[in-house]
Image: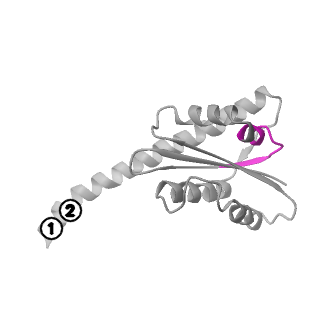
């Protein structure tokens, strides 16, 4: 039994390091995307959005659901996410929106996401919206593709 544990431990440690590295990459891309979006909004003379952990948590669940194929790549369930935001921040009056992005490669993930949203009229409208808060979730699927969710909220 001890021999099994000793053989299993290096594999477990390797898997834990891989997850940490992936989480680190995704966190780095999340922060980079938030910075790029605010820089873009500044160029348009719009206010910066504040990144809220609660919104990131909600966005992350949707990104993970799409990456694991529990849900398709879509805005399905957006109203449920809005209700979660509303409940978490005790808001009666609000405006909310959501942008999604998928790519088969993590290269320049933040830049790719922003450019795709700029190039899409509906997503671009969300980028330019009168929003004060943002939350971003990023998840990797088994094939190495990345799902990006950005939620927007104002009160």
Residue 134 colored in magenta in the image: yes
Q: Which mark is residue 4?
A: 1
- Left or right: 53, with 26 as reference point: right
Q: Find residue 25 and report its horizontal and vertical position in percent.
A: 47, 42
Q: Residue at x 63, y 59 (%)?
A: 58
Disc 2 vs disc 1: Cβ atoms closer than 8 Å? yes
Specify the quadrant that holds the C terminus. Answer: bottom right
Point 80% across, 66% down: residue: 90
Please give the range of residues in magenta: 123-135
Front-most of residues 138 and 73: 73
Q: Residues within 10 Å of mark 1 (few under 14, many from 20)?
A: few
Residue positioned 67% across, 37% down in the render:
117
**Image quadrant in which the N terminus is located:** bottom left
Q: Secondary structure at mark 2?
A: helix
Q: Residues within 10 Å of mark 2 (few under 14, many from 20)?
A: few
Q: CA distance from mark 2 to mark 1?
A: 6 Å
Residue 45 drawn above or below residue 74: above
Task: In the rendered structure, find residue 133 and report the number of the disc placed on it.
Answer: none
Residue 139 locus on image (x, y percent):
50, 50
Residue shown at the point (61%, 53%) measured from the top left: 74
Residue 5 at x, y percent in the picture: 19, 67
User: Residue under circle 2?
Assistant: 8
Percent from the top left, x then y, of residue 133?
75, 48
- Name the residue furthest bottom: 1
């Amino acid at each position: 039994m001890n021999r099994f544990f000793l053989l299993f431990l290096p594999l477990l440690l390797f898997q834990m390091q891989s997850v940490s590295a992936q989480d680190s990459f995704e966190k780095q891309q999340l922060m980079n995307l938030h910075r790029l979006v605010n820089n873009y909004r500044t160029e348009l003379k719009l206010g910066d959005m504040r990144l809220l952990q609660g919104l990131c948590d909600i966005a992350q669940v949707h990104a993970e659901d799409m990456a694991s194929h529990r849900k398709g790549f879509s805005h399905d369930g957006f109203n449920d996410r809005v209700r979660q935001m509303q409940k978490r921040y005790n808001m009666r009056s609000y405006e909310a929106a959501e942008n999604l992005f998928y790519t088969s490669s993590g290269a320049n993930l933040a830049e790719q996401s922003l450019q795709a949203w700029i190039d899409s009229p509906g997503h671009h409208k969300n980028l330019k919206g009168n929003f004060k808060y943002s939350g971003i979730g990023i998840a990797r699927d088994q094939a190495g593709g990345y799902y990006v969710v950005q939620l927007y909220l104002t009160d």
